[in-house]
Amino acid sequence: MTDHLTAPLTNRSLPIALLRAREKVMGPIRAMLSDVGVTEQQWRVLRVLDERGPLDPTEIADRSVLLLPSLTRILQTLVAKGLVSRAPHPTDRRKQVVSITANGQQLIADNLQQSQELTAWLRESFGSQKLDQLLDLLNELDQLDPPNKSSPQK
Amino acid sequence: MTDHLTAPLTNRSLPIALLRAREKVMGPIRAMLSDVGVTEQQWRVLRVLDERGPLDPTEIADRSVLLLPSLTRILQTLVAKGLVSRAPHPTDRRKQVVSITANGQQLIADNLQQSQELTAWLRESFGSQKLDQLLDLLNELDQLDPPNKSSPQK
DNA sequence: GATAATAACTTAACACGTTAACAGAAAGCG
DNA sequence: CGCTTTCTGTTAACGTGTTAAGTTATTATC
């Protein structure tokens, strides 16, 4: 019972539609994570480190779609929670190397299954084909060159 | 030059894909708005009020996809900027009626064209058909019932 | 019609998003 | 080599996202 009469414009606004879709998908995931005591962003960082091994902050930020100032704060809390650890880079003294700890790996192991069940739920209720189609469109969209700024062709 | 080797998992993660897509679309819009001195959320509120006339905060929150606590703060700054005004609801003293001011309407008028040019750019560079397809998929996704919680079938 | 739910905000607290300014280290260049 | 530029990460400041608690007003119930 979504009101067809009351949302004529925002339904066709891509930013709003993306926002609503994201809320829909993230709701259940956030519920799961709040039980564990980590935020959505902290979870992303932990998963990246778990999947790819020790990384420097810049690369973590890239892969988990966070800005560096946000990541700085997130890493501080993750270190305080004992879920990740930091070490100086062996050759470049500007850099660090961040690793997930055993506790962090345990946290992921404890919740990965439920996380996967949620994505499975999505695939079933939305339809596998439509989900893939949606992902393809989003990825294509992400490869557009923004306007203004004397846009170089790559 | 998007790295095919370095983003194998996040590309297929819907939450991440939605996040990236939203960043892509919002970037230029945010640039425009920062010149004017309003945030993306403040702009949404102003547009809703401009399009639909005076509303109470609950309905504004719905239409602009904001939570009430956020909206409370946003309305305070918009009132301080002289872009909206508040009046008590005539019959229900819990409610308010929020209206856009002449200055607020002027701000919208001054920037609506550029905003529309950005959406036109998107439609052209991404393709009108694919954009509609994407919007349809996102709206469909938004109508799913979330899992858990003894989900009623509506 | 008093009392218990509900509803419409508001406030508070904490985390993140975003931009700008900053400090230290490495690279480039003359 | 010294100097400038660039890179890496941090801090700061402001606004928003999110959850929980609190206030006042309305509605429901007995």
Image (cartoon, coloured by chain):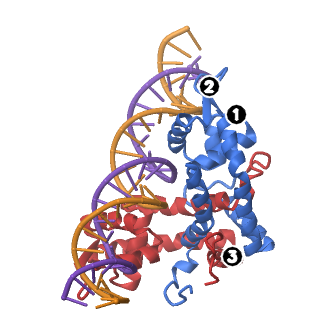
Chain colours: A red, B blue, C orange, D purple
Q: Amino acid at mark 2?
A: Ala
Left or right, A17 with respect to C16, comes to right
The residue shown at (72%, 68%) is B122
**Nearer the N terminus, badge 1 or badge 2?**
1
Q: Nearest the camera: A54 or B78?
A: B78
The amino acid sitting under disc 3 is: Leu
**Mark 3: few/some/many CA within 10 Å (<14, 14-19, 20+):** some
Q: Are marks 2 and 3 on the same chain?
A: no
SS for dot 2: strand
- The mark lying in front, picked from 2 and 3, is 2
Q: Is B138 placed above or below A98 here? A: above
The residue carrying mark 2 is B87
The residue carrying mark 1 is B54
Query: What residue does disc 3 label?
Result: A137
Q: Is residue D3 above or below residue A8?
A: below
The quarter in which the N terminus of chain B is drawn is: bottom right
Give me the chain letter of mark 1: B
Q: Residue at x 61, y 43 (%)?
A: B61
Mark 1: amino acid: Pro
SS at mark 1 in the image: loop
- For label 2, the crowd category at 10 Å Cα-Cα, with few meaning under 14, some 14 to 19 and many 20 or more, is few
Taking the spot 62% from the left edge, 60% from the top edge, the residue there is B29
Circle number at residue A64:
none
Residue closer to the observer: B20 or A43? B20
Q: CA distance from mark 2 to mark 3?
A: 44 Å
Give the secondary structure at mark 3: helix
Q: Residues within 10 Å of mark 1 (few under 14, many from 20)?
A: many
Q: Position of residue A145 (x, y in %)?
A: 64, 76
Mark 3 chain: A
